[in-house]
Image: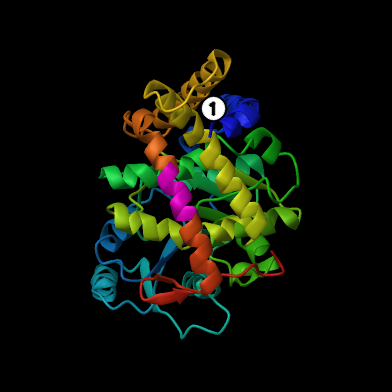
Amino acid sequence: MTALWGSQQWTVLGFLAITCVIELANWFTLRRMSAYDAPPRTPRVSVLVPARNEERNIERCVLSLLDQRYADYEVVVLDDGSTDGTLGILEHLAASDRRLRVLRGADLPAGWMGKHWACQQLLEASTGEYVLYVDADTWHHPMAVANGVAAMLAGRVDMLSALPQEHVGSVGELLIVPVVPWSFFALLPLLLAFHLRTPLLSSAVGQYMMFRRSVLESVGGFGSVRSTAADDIGLARVIKSAGYRWRLVDGMDRVHCRMYQGFVESFRGFAKNLFAVFYHNVPLFVFIWLFVLMAYALPLVIILGWAAGIWTVTAASLRVAVGCVALATLQWGVIAIRFRLPGWLAVTWPAGQVVTVVVAFVSLFGSLVHAGRWKGRTIVSRQHPKE
């Protein structure tokens, strides 16, 4: 253990320092969606919601979408073979508000993942010049559509994704869910990502994705990512690869989400698609997550082992380990502040990083043996060639 630390301590310190610098730069680069004024024009927007077994979330989501302060929009929800009360709730809402259209999903074709097929059907049934996809477990400020359109028009972009306010209701959720803002804010240098065409330097959150319809259709719609679990990140890469403009904004004042409820649901939810984010590249995936484990866990292990008298550490190596833990704590503290997460994230982050690494390898194993399941469907994720 101490030999590994002695050989890698400066690499770990440098990595953590760089990620803190990325956070600082991103703090000023990531603009709040609410900062955009009303759009100069109001192109028709289709707000599209795929829903499967969402009876606990769907009413709040749809009602918030029907309350938008925008002149020309429609709300279309597709029930994707729900086995709970989702469809009944949707039909009740549609009976009282003609702005809501409810569709029933067609049978899943071979080679498609369920949500992706639902999103493609929604695209084909919609009428808007712009299309906005939101998840059924989100709820939205009345200006969420207007501010999104304003941001699209102001930046002359073709795809816009907003980071929502992620709500966590348990310690189990706090251990896993913050990996979303961490991956965007500490690992993705947005200033470079916005100006370089490298597809790897792009990402998105499926909870809020707005497209110019013509652009989404030109890249093949959701068919371009039909067999990869991470459709949001996959689409951002496809859009960027095709030479179109992509942007990410801070949507916390406009979009809210509680992704999962409890530790088990959070664990399974992230495990279903984490491997797909890394182009299904096994060596790259294993290297990255072992490095993450070393960077965030090893310095703390060295300090605790030294304090317990388990091993001897030189004064210089101990100082580096303390510096690494301090930088990691600073990094997670900044994320807690910027993304309005509980302050004790600055204390729970070591456990959270270890759990996330376990989730990563469960995701890898599940993808390789096709053992993943979500909402009653087996997940078989592949990297589609067009992505």
Above or below for 90 versus 166: below
Q: Main secondary structure of the magenta part?
A: helix
Q: Nearer the viewer, residue 35 or 120?
A: 120
Q: In the figure, residue 150 lies in which quadrant?
A: top right
Q: x, y (%) of residue 271?
A: 45, 59
Q: In the figure, residue 59 lies in which quadrant?
A: bottom left
Residue 243 in view: yes
- Colour convention of the picture: rainbow
Which three-letter amino acid code belongs to the residue tagged 1?
Answer: Trp
SS state under label 1:
helix
Apparent side of residue 61 relative to residue 48 in the rendered image (left or right): left
Q: x, y (%) of residue 362?
A: 46, 60
Q: Residue at x 52, y 23 (%)?
A: 321
Q: In the figure, residue 30 lies in which quadrant?
A: top right
Q: Residue at x 70, y 36 (%)?
A: 192
Q: Pick out the residue farthest to the top.
A: 315
Magenta segment: 354-360
Say whether residue 221 is magenta.
no
Q: Residue at x 56, y 84 (%)?
A: 110
Q: Residue at x 55, y 17 (%)?
A: 314
Above or below for 286 versus 273: above
Q: Nearer the viewer, residue 381 or 38?
A: 381
Tell me the residue that label 1 is attached to.
27
Residue 135 in view: no
Above or below for 80 versus 305: below
Q: x, y (%) of residue 128?
A: 54, 63
Say whether residue 355 is magenta.
yes
In the picture, the quarter occupied by the C terminus is: bottom right
Q: Assess disc 1: are there few (<14), some (14-19) or many (≥20) residues with their C-alpha within 10 Å of its C-alpha.
A: some
Q: Nearer the viewer, residue 378 or 106?
A: 378
Apparent side of residue 203 relative to residue 358 in the rendered image (left or right): right
